[in-house]
Amino acid sequence: MTSQRMQHIALPLVGLGVFVAPAAFGGTGSVYSAAVLIAIFAVMAYGLDVIVSDLGEVSLAHTVFFAVGSYTTAWLSTKAGAGAWVTLGASIAVVLIFAAFIGLVTLRLREFVFSLVTYAVAVVAMSVASNWAFLGGSDGIRGIPMLDLSIAGLPLTARNDGELWPYAFALLAITIYVVDRFRHSRLGAAAIMTHLNPRLATMSGIDPARVRLQVFLVSAPISAAAGWLYAYQRAYVSADVLENYFLILMLTAVVLMGRRQLLGPLAATALVLMQEKFFSLGGYVDKIVLGSVLVLVLAFFPQGLMGLMRPLRRIAQRRAPSQTVITTVENPK
Amino acid sequence: MNLTQQLINGIVLGHAFALVAIGWTLLLGVARLVNFGHGQMYMLGAFVTWWAVVKAGVPYVLAVPIAMAIGALFGLVMQRVMLKATFEQNLVSIMIMTLGFGYVLHGGAALVFGSTGQILDTALSRNDITIGDLWFTWQDAAIVIAAIVVFVGLKWVLDGTRVGRLVRMVAEDPKLAMLAGVNVRRVYYGVFAFEGAAVAFAAGMVAPRTPILTSMGFEEVIMTFVVVVLGGIGSVTGSYVAGVALGLFTALFGALVSPAYTTAAAFLVLIAVLVLRPRGLSAGPAAGAH
Amino acid sequence: MSASVNVVLRVRDLRVAYAGNQAVDLKSLDVGQGEVVGVVGANGAGKSTLVNALAGWSRGAPRVTGEVALGGQRVDGRPTHERIRSGLLLVPEGRLVFGRMNVEDNLSTAFSPLAAPGRKVYTRDEIYELFPRLKERRHHLGSQLSGGERQMLGIGRALMMGPRVLLLDEPSIGLAPKLVQQVLDTMRTLARSGLSILLVEQNVRAALEVVDRLLLLERGRVVLEGPAAQVGNDPRIAQAYLGVATA
């Protein structure tokens, strides 16, 4: 059976498994809460995954995209009484404006300047969100109504995490599908080429700056959609959605399993959140653990946990070790 | 608003910015490395100094070198862990790793020092100098003097000594420097240790001006970034000038418009410069330390 | 080569592989004291890869295995700068000068080793004597120098580091014939004073004027080896460059 067909069969099975997992683990409020958060943060991480794994650049602005989704949703639903579909559309529209601005400003800049600019955007956004009365200042915006996606008489509401789970799962599934489609698209191919060999890409007619802008514009709505759902889950939004925690979480989710693994961010997010919820060592120690994991993975296991599994899998299959391919996404030379 | 007072504030603030940015000037200019943990290392320097003075009763004059030593040590540890990525010039990994280090520092510092704000008072910060209507503290004066001394010293070392020449060689072309017998690895270690010590020194000098929190450091990174890019990456003189200019801008903006959005304003100035002049304000080539 | 000649550079089983692709596969190479050994071959034959690997200065991250010994001591595990300091000097193709420093400073960047038997450490004045042109241009920046001047600067700096073996990668590339002649003459003089030279050259005729022995490299392997007088007229050399199949 080819790996393509295996994927077509395995993926839906995995999806089904994931969908029923919370119920299988007891179906309690805290289990569903964990599951919903895992789904939301995984979607947030997929937005970053596209930029880091495919394009090979570091964007530190995805916390801002996440926050844009949350704040747009919070503001429109509380101050303008907008419904869930409207807030979703508005979140995507507003985030595209932000992403376009950042992308155009950094169009011709070197990679590390691009990263620094995105970092600065995040810090400035934090100070603006904490101080601007329009966004609720340090109190934030409270009283977000429950999620209501009802259309044409069909009721689609969620009053608690248990009812929110199918929507979170749907968002997750759609995101994974979008990322997969992206990776098989021309833009995805252009992104990889720009990442691995910018000069060759230019000679093939690809404009690396435009590719970066386009990939940025594709990745932003993903994180914003996660922010949209997060607003409904928490029922309030404040400047703490811009905290560094989300950034470190996203980055760890992207690198822990190994680059460009379709289910990698999901698995990694699940691991991290489960450690926090069920094996927590206290808030600060958890920070130390998370940060250390990020550093150690990149320093000593650049291929991620999946990279560790490869030699083990080879031993299990009792085949002679194949010649190590030196060229990796890490080390393309 | 007293314009001259604001100008004095601006000059003090500017020298503080320049001093905080000096480690990055060398790090970016020589090793092309970005240290996103810079802000947390600043926070660490501030808190070690505070703890030494307030909790351990060490005189301020000794506390600052202690903070510098710890900062340098941390820089060395970071570089050791990131060595492979440094040699491969794997900037993506380096940037993410420094973010991770910063996060670990944040958690560790909060664990050890707590999460409430602290004030570091020194003999210098408690004593004011008043000249007519104008007012500043001895600490402020010390910051200005220290910044000038450090910048002049660094420029002298880079231009006039053998060590400085080694650093300039590695800054311009590390592979060629290897062929000239330079131990490039040791130079990278040195530059990272300098970054650690320099940012800790800056913290020790500047922290007495405001209350310190273990959650601080992000704005410092932005200001440092603005200073280094505006001054021309790797230019020691450029960083000094840009720092002072930024300080004046911040002071005036804070007094005339709003004190809460000064970082945002500085950032917008940087964006404007980047859009109009992608290589920063210094006209020379962007790489190398000079 | 007679057994009484002192072998300064000894290479055994040197293999350089990029992602499973064998770029160099050298069984053995010896360079004696005062000997000039030439390595020739068509573009892409692996000549540069060979000398870069000897200096530990390979591009990218290839797998390099084998023994390299300098004056009887193994250097193959050591980093580049240590090999340089021990007297294994490389003057690479292209990357020769620090553009932002002037000639004097460029020469001053040379690491000064302790004097040792078999290692002549040239002083800056001696370099100026060897290359008067450099003295004329000594306050000019590296980026302002011509190709020939950069070549002289590269060789000059290497000499100031007291080489026991000098690896030269295509010193004649892009140089006018008169300058090529000057470089070759310099090499002959240096060899006569006891310096061992491994010369990589595309210009076979130029190489033949100065080398004692010649190696022909094809796809990373030595296909022909011998004294210059014998091997110089071998048709295989022309065939290697013209791509004509050997008989």
Image (tube, coloured by chain):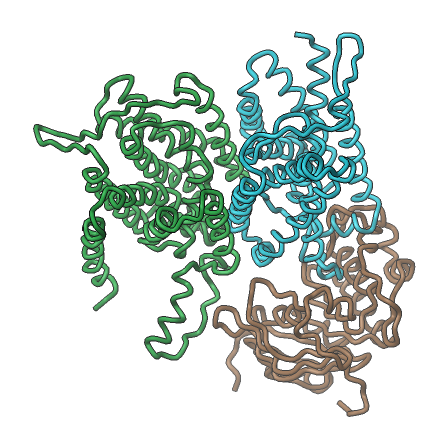
Residue A57 image position (x, y, % from top left): 47, 45
Q: Residue furthest bottom?
A: C3
Q: Vertical placement of C165 versus A40: above or below? A: below
Residue B251 image position (x, y, % from top left): 64, 18
Image quadrant in which you'd find residue A258: bottom left
Residue at (29% x, 21% y) in the render: A76
Q: In which quarter of the image is the N terminus of chain B?
A: top right
Specify the colour of chain C. brown
Residue at (24% x, 46% y) in the render: A173
Residue at (63% x, 68% y) in the render: C48
- Camera-side residue: C44 or A236? A236
Q: Vertical placement of B136 versus B275: above or below? A: above
- Camera-side residue: C120 or B151? B151
- Whether residue B101 is visible here, answered yes or no, is yes
Image quadrant in which you'd find residue A41: top left
Specify the colour of chain B. cyan
Residue B204 image position (x, y, % from top left): 70, 35
Residue B135 in the figure: left or right of residue A172: right
Image quadrant in which you'd find residue A1: bottom left
